[in-house]
Amino acid sequence: MFTFSPVGVIHSCFKEKFGIPRQPGLVPEARAILELLPPYSRAEAVRGLENFSHIWISFVFHACLGESWKPTVRPPRLGGNRRLGVFATRSTHRPNPIGLSAVELEKIIVEQGKVLLHLKGIDLLDGTPVLDIKPYLPYSDRIAEATGGFAAAAPAAPFKVQFSQSALDLCATVPQLEALIRRILSLDPRPAYYGKGDGKSIFGMKLLDYDVQWEVDGEVVLVNAVIPIGEMSIP
Ligand code: SAM
């Protein structure tokens, strides 16, 4: 058998699974820092990587550890009601809960003994353990004639996103927060079993240091409130 230890950990804007895009690149505003862990936190371990625009990250679905897997799963893209083989999907519930994402590498910062890779367009939960990092090689990894099975094109962004004035006022104090929320919600992050026509429903997700509260009414999302987590009242 094998034992792998993480080479790094993800510090992500996504503080819970709900709301995370289903693949990388769908929300370019979604950022993370990949911090290398000792004994790998050495500048020479990433020497030359800064010349690549994108990297592959293999990681552990750590928030699913201990959960069982099944030979077939119901991908959200198929409305959650058709089963496909687990190996025909990118499900988080798999025999070895390992994920793979190609993400944009914005810059590498080496400071105070830390090696920090700044990433964009991520689909990773805060605290995700990283098993490996590899440069994305366009000549080999970009396959023009590839076919995409049940997920041939990027998912639609079915929702128009509107903000309450108080939510807009808060977003105005944080760079890119409004754009980040807008893009995430436009993609409809709800589980597949929430079909259209379910009427008005209220949701919340933790993003950066904020609790984002929103409701769906038909094809419109209204962001009611963006509340700094430290300021939330506990009933
Ligand atoms: N791009 C990766 C892949 O194909 O292996 C991940 C795809 S998976 C469908 C994306 C989902 O994984 C996200 O929407 C989020 O809910 C979940 N996720 C991300 N990081 C996770 C983690 N560390 N543990 C458990 N689930 C995670």
Image: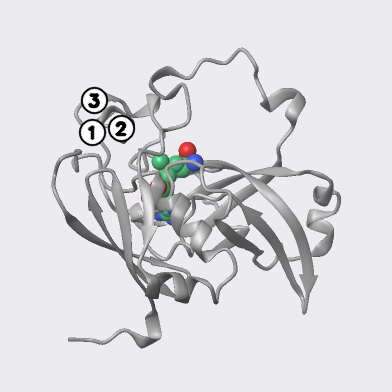
Are the residues tagged 3 and 2 within 8 Å (C-beta)? Answer: no
Marker disc for residue 75: 2
Which secondary structure, mark 1? loop
Tell me residue 177's x, y (percent).
52, 65
Write down the residue under mark 1. Answer: 80
- Of labels 1 and 2, earlier in sequence is 2
Q: Depth check: 143 or 183 in front?
A: 183
Which secondary structure, mark 3? loop
Under mark 1, the amino acid is Gly
Name above or below for residue 205 compared with residue 113: above
Q: Tell me if 115 is positioned left or right of 24 in this view.
A: right
As drawn, which residue projects farthest toward the front? 165
Q: Residue at x 64, y 65 (%)?
A: 35
On the question of residue 1 being in view, the answer is no
Name above or below for residue 191 compared with residue 125: above
Query: Label 3 neighbourhood size at 10 Å, few (<14), some (14-19), many (20+)?
Result: few
On the question of residue 126 being in view, the answer is yes
Name above or below for residue 186 compared with residue 129: above
- Which of discs 1 and 3 lies nearer the camera? The answer is 1
Are the residues tagged 1 and 2 within 8 Å (C-beta)? Answer: yes
Write down the residue under mark 3. Answer: 83
In terms of image quadrants, where is residue 34? bottom right
